[in-house]
Image (spheres, rainbow, N blue to C red):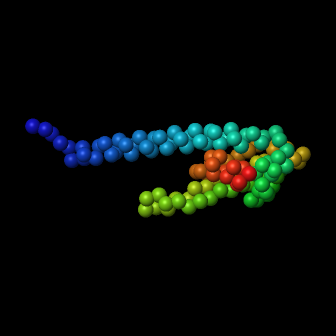
Amino acid sequence: MRLAFPCSRHAGAILVLAAAVLGLAACADSDDTAYQGFIGRWVGKPASQVVADWGPPDYKTAERGMDVLQYNYSEAISWGERPKRLTCSTNFLVDSAGIVRSAETEGNACFTKTSGPAARGR
């Protein structure tokens, strides 16, 4: 006699789904780390180099006594029945001498293929 649990036929699908979610989480962490390293290339360089490589910023503001060059990425995608918005905001903080002192990022799609010079056709 074989015992069967009502949800046992879905167990394989659940395991595959769980593995995919964990895999995406691992990719997000590695993409985020890679992107942080990527934007860190401009720290210590003149802001003019950022503009030469990235193009004109989407916004230029002042924050914490520094200029902020902000580059934004946004795209709507279909995710099953729910649309999802992919975003990335990359900020370069520039001191009064025109040198990039830090680079910060925020969003759920911050990787070189969506943000940065290559994504901007540079």
Q: Classify residue 66 as left or right of residue 121.
A: right
Q: Residue at x 67, y 48 (%)?
A: 105
Answer yes or no: is residue 66 visible: no
| Front residue (pair 42, 119) | 119
Q: Residue at x 69, y 41 (%)?
A: 38
Q: Residue at x 40, y 43 (%)?
A: 18
The relative height of residue 19 versus residue 87 in the rendered view (above or below) is above
Q: Residue furthest front?
A: 121
Residue 102 spot, x, y in % from top left: 76, 43
Asked where in the image residue 2 lies, by quadrant, the reply is top left
Answer yes or no: is residue 9 visible: yes
Asked where in the image residue 11 lies, by quadrant, the reply is top left
The relative height of residue 42 versus residue 58 in the rendered view (above or below) is above
Total marks placed = 0
Residue 96 spot, x, y in % from top left: 88, 48
| Screen quadrant of the N terminus | top left
Residue 80 spot, x, y in % from top left: 43, 59
